[in-house]
Each structure stands twice: as C-alpha cells, then as structure tokens.
Amino acid sequence: MPDDIIGLIRENVIQGRVTRDDEGMDEGMSGQPGVTELIEQALASELGIKDIVARGLSGGMDVVGQKFEAGEYYIPDMLASAEAVGAAMDILQPRLAKGGVKTKGTVLVATVKDDLHDIGKNIVSILLRGAGYVVKDLGNNIDTQVIVDAVREEKPQFLGLSALLTSTMARMGEVIQALEDNGLRDQVKIIIGGAPVSEEFANSIGADGYGADGFQAVAVVEDLNSDSEG
C-alpha cells in the first residue's frame, strides 16, 4: 500500500494534477485523488517524508524533465507539474523541520533589477524545493543591494539569479561584483539563467554555474553541492 501511494503521487505529478478536480494530461482522471490528497494519505500512512519527496515528487519531475527534453511536454505542461510539486511541498515543509529531516541547503533566488519576468525563476524554485532544498525567493525587479544584504543575512549556500532581457543580464555581473566588494563572494555559489544567458556569459561574469532550463539549473546545484560535500 505505501508503494502504491508513492506511485500514485509520482504519476499525478507527471499528470500535473494538484487536486481531484484537475483533469490531468490523460482523460478520465478527474475525480481521482490529486497530489495534495495523496500527500495527506501518505502522511496518514506514516510514510517517510524522504520517500515521499525523493520517490514521489522528485521521481515524477524526473520523468517530466525527460518528456520536456524529448519535446513531448511543453512549458504549460511543465508548469502544471511544477505547481503540483509546489502544492505538495507547502504541505510537507513544516513537517520536514519538525521531523528533523535535514535539507540539502538553502538557495536564495531573485530576478535582477529592472526585469519583471519570473516564470523561469518560479519553476526553478519549485523544482529545487522538490529536490530537498530550502528556497527563499526575493521576487523580481530586485535591487543589487537588496540581494547583497539578503546573502549577508540569510547565508545561503546558493544564489540563483534570473534575467529574461538582454538589457538586464548585465545586472547579474553587477551583483557578483557587489558581493565581491562586500567580502561575500566566496561564501555563496552563484547560478544564473534566463533566455538571453549562456554558459559563455556565465563564465565571463564569474558565475559558478548556468542552467538553460529549470531541470538543468537543479542539476547544476546538485553538482555544486556534491563538490562542496566531497
């Protein structure tokens, strides 16, 4: 029975179903328990939160990532699945702390000054939460000094910066330079992303990593985390 619930959580993440009222990708699923109902069932069955997150949520998003890369899923499909994971993590987050489950680290995310786009950042945030990280989202159009102050106060292991405009991507370099000037650069790993951003640009401004999409961004964070633990 526990494995059945985990499997259903995984499948409903793939289907992008938050609640029983959602249709999902396949026909005939409306009325069946969605991710939030299944999470409550899993908790009532005393399933371990690590299993729920790793095998159910992350397992489902791994499949979504494969479908996205294969061209079977598009951004709206990925958003639906990410929303399901986000709703699940809203339920699980308080229990993670209470249960003494150690998180993988803290990630601070922000869209840089003068850029109002946040869909990509929001997807990355949800995927990171599903992968076991604590995510603190500063929002969009965030001033460089606000980001610097947040790094100083929150002491995150990672900082994710997003920009969707060629006119604002230079702000990422400004943030990195400001962290350097304030003696904070060595304390945080910086990952950048967004439509106009590239690996070459990331290297040119001294970022630690670049994510072409949400799934790659999470993979980069995981790699950097493994390196720091090793």
Image: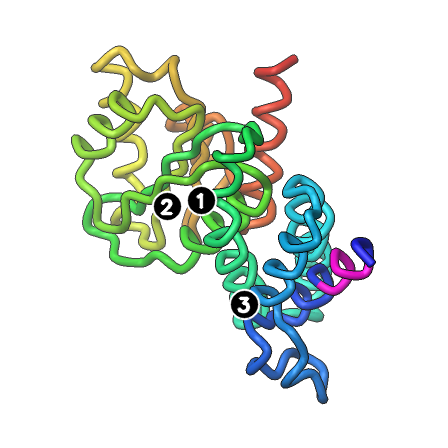
Where disc 1 sits, the SS reads strand
User: Residue 193: which numbered mark, if any?
Assistant: 1
Q: Distance between the residues labelled 2 and 1?
A: 5 Å
Could one spot residue 212 in this view of the protein? no
Q: Are marks 2 and 1 in contact (CB under 8 Å)?
A: yes
Residue 206 vertical position relative to residue 195 in the rendered view, above or below = above
Q: Which residue is drawn at 26% across and 47% down?
A: 168
Taking 186 as reference, is 92 left or right?
right
Q: Which of 182 and 96 is in front in this view?
A: 96
The residue type indicated by label 1 comes to Gly
The residue type indicated by label 3 comes to Ile
Residue 78 vertical position relative to residue 33 in the rendered view, above or below = above
User: What are the residue bounds of the magenta stretch?
Assistant: 4-8
N-terminal of the pair, mark 2 or mark 1, is 2
Residue where numbered disc 3 is placed: 75
User: Residue 74: which numbered mark, if any?
Assistant: none
Provide the major secondary structure of the magenta segment.
helix
Badge 3: how crowded within 10 Å, few (<14), some, or many (20+)?
A: few
Depth check, mark 3 against mark 1: the one in front is 3
